Amino acid sequence: MLERPLFFALLFPVSSLFWWFFEYLNRFVQNWHYLGGEVSATQYLLYGSISFSTVLPAVLSTKELLLTSFRLNQAFSNFVKLPWVNTPLLGWILVLCASASLFFIGIYPNYLFSMLWVAPLLIIIGLQILNREPHIFSPVSTGNWRDVVSAAFGALICGWFWEMWNYWSLAKWEYSIPFVQRYHIFEMPLLGYAGYLPFGLECYAVASLLEELLEKRAT
C-alpha cells in the first residue's frame, strides 16, 4: 500500500461511496439498523461517510498482510484450477441472475437478502468477463487462489473486530436477519459472519477497478 500512495488515498472516498451503496440496498431488506445517538440528516451523512471511508483501506490492508503468510501462499498458489471462469456463458449467467435478484430483492427480501452481498460482485465479474477483461477470479483458472482467499478472510478478520467494537459501543448497529437470527457472537448471528467472505471479494473487485483506472490514466 505504501508504494501506491495515490491508490491508497483514493480508497477512502471510494470506500465511503461503496458502503453507502450497501446502505441503499439495506433499505429493501432491513437486515441492520442503527441505535443510540440522535443526529440530524447532515450529521448522519457526515459521520457515516467518515466511518464508511475506512472499510476498503482496512480490508485491503488486511489482505496484503495475509499475503505475507508462507502457509497461505503454499496452500493456494497451486490449488484447484477452474478454467471456465472466463467463458462468456458464465458472464451472461452471472449478470442475468444477479440483476434479477436485485430487481426482486425488495419484493422477496426474506428470501433474497443474501444477494445484497453477492449480486454486486457477480455483476462486476460478469461484465468483466463479457468485455474480455481480467477480473479477480482470472488467476483461479490456473489454480492461483491467493488473492481471492486473502481478500475473503481479510474481510472476515476486519468484520470480527468491527462487530466486537460495535458490541461495546453506545451508538451501534443491530441485526435482523431471516432464518439465522440465533447463536450470536456480539450482535451478529453466527451464520451472518459468512457474509463477510463475499464482501471481501467485493472490496477486492472494487479496489482492482480503481487500480486499473489509475493505471490507464498513467499511460
Image (cartoon, rainbow, N blue to C red):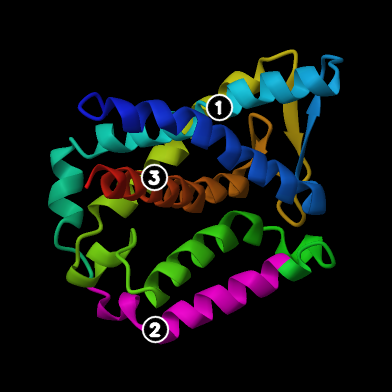
- Classify residue 101 as left or right of residue 38: left
Picture residue at 71% right of the left edge, 41% below the top: 23
- Compared with 110, 53 (above or below) is above
3 or 2: mark nearer the eye: 3
Question: Percent from the top left, x then y, of residue 75?
Answer: 18, 53
- Classify residue 175 as left or right of residue 115: right
Amino acid on which disc 1 is placed: Trp
Picture residue at 66% right of the left edge, 39% below the top: 20
2 or 1: mark nearer the eye: 2
- The range drawn in magenta is 81-102
Looking at marks 3 and 1 on the same chain, the residue that comes earlier in the sequence is marked by 1
Amino acid on which disc 3 is placed: Leu
Kindly identify which residue carries mark 3.
Answer: 210
Picture residue at 52% right of the left edge, 45% below the top: 196
Total numbered badges shown on the rendered structure: 3
Q: Is residue 134 visible in the rendered structure shown here?
A: yes
Q: Which mark is residue 88?
A: 2
Q: Which mark is residue 162?
A: 1
Which quadrant is home to the N terminus? top left
